Amino acid sequence: MTLLDGKLLSENIKSEMAAEVVQILARGGKTPHLAAVLVGENAASQVYVSSKIRSCEQVGFKSSLIRRPAETSEAELLDIVRQLNEDPDVDGFIVQLPLPKHINEENIVLAIDPKKDVDGFHPVNFGRMAQGLSAFLPATPMGIVEILRRYNIPTAGKHCVVVGRSNIVGTPISILLSRKGYPGDCTVTLTHSRTADLPAEVRRADIIVAAIGIPNFIKADWVKPGAVVIDVGINRIDDPSKKSGSRIVGDVDFDAVAPLCSYITPVPGGVGLMTVTALLMNTLKACKGEVYTRI
Ligand code: GUN
């Protein structure tokens, strides 16, 4: 069994990006610039956004954090989005979700210029991805694809079973892995809470992508020996043996499943770290004008 080391990969990719930024600047190009909008005091969102800003510093990007209180109106947030769309110095930006209840997230995402949508959440980017056109891919599926690519894991003709059908992970990764080319050319089964006999479906998988958000959900007797296991889960569970009283586990019962696999991502240290790195990769692409080349 080989651990798919998201920490090592993300450090390698960040070094490559940092070197590229140096080259861009030496040629007289502009510093890539990511802006993040954070509304309210959601604790997890604050951690995620700080990590995104810190990662920008590591690779030499400029970053801007726009913080607003939870009472911010939808109209005020739409105005911030409009200003970021129009700001020529900002290559890409994200509005951290979830937003306070009184703000309609769909309205906000639809207001983002797809050319600056480095989260890949806008339906234009989703549609372009689904059609195999160049697009900003959502960060988590993009991180998964990058793990498969950098570990040279064969995908053509493999049966991939995705567990969970969210708009930002399960559904897009099922599309990406079924697309022509590498990593792709998989036969994909997208499973969810209404799937009949889920263990039987998962047992057929050469590649399992677990993105259901339930701790230790995928059991050892669901896993075909030799399978590749990608665990997207980030679940906090009680653990009295820890000083903090809790720890983070994935959607896969790691201790029981790992000995059976050919490859597996640990949690933490797997997909999660690649997600922030993928956002930076999208920002660099936005800065270089690589995604929207024809319009
Ligand atoms: N909330 C949880 N994950 C994400 C993400 O990738 N992007 C944004 N904007 N919000 C999130």
Image (spheres, rainbow, N blue to C red):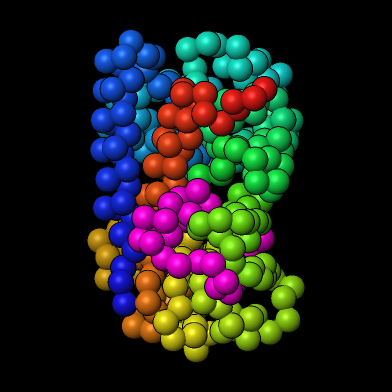
Above or below: residue 1 compared with residue 19? below
The residue located at (33%, 20%) in the rendering is 24
Kindly identify the residue that appears in the image at 36 percent across and 38 percent down.
51
Res 196 → quadrant: bottom right
> Which residue is located at x 38 percent, y 84 percent?
260
Task: Give percent across and percent down for residue 272.
Answer: 41, 52
Left or right, 246 with reference to 184? left
Q: Residue at x 37, y 72 (%)?
A: 263
Camera sees residue 39:
no
- Asked whether, in this view, residue 248 is left or right of residue 82, the answer is left
Q: Name the one closer to the observer, 16 or 231.
A: 16
Q: Can the viewer see residue 87 in this picture?
A: yes
Q: Residue placed farthest to the bottom in the image?
A: 221
What x and y, as percent, mark residue 220? 46, 85
Task: Relative to 87, say whether 255 is above or below.
Answer: below
Q: Position of residue 49 (x, y in %)?
A: 43, 35
Residue 110 versus residue 9: which sits nearer the camera?
9
Q: Quadrant of the N terminus?
A: bottom left
Quadrant containing the C terminus in the rendered view: top right
How many badges with numbers are in the image? 0
222 sits to left or right of 164: left
Q: Position of residue 209 (x, y in %)?
A: 53, 66
| Residue 3 sits inside the magenta stretch | no
> Compared with residue 40, is residue 1 higher up or lower down, i.e. above or below?
below
Indicate which quadrant contains ligand 1.
top right
Which residues are the magenta region?
Answer: 140-165
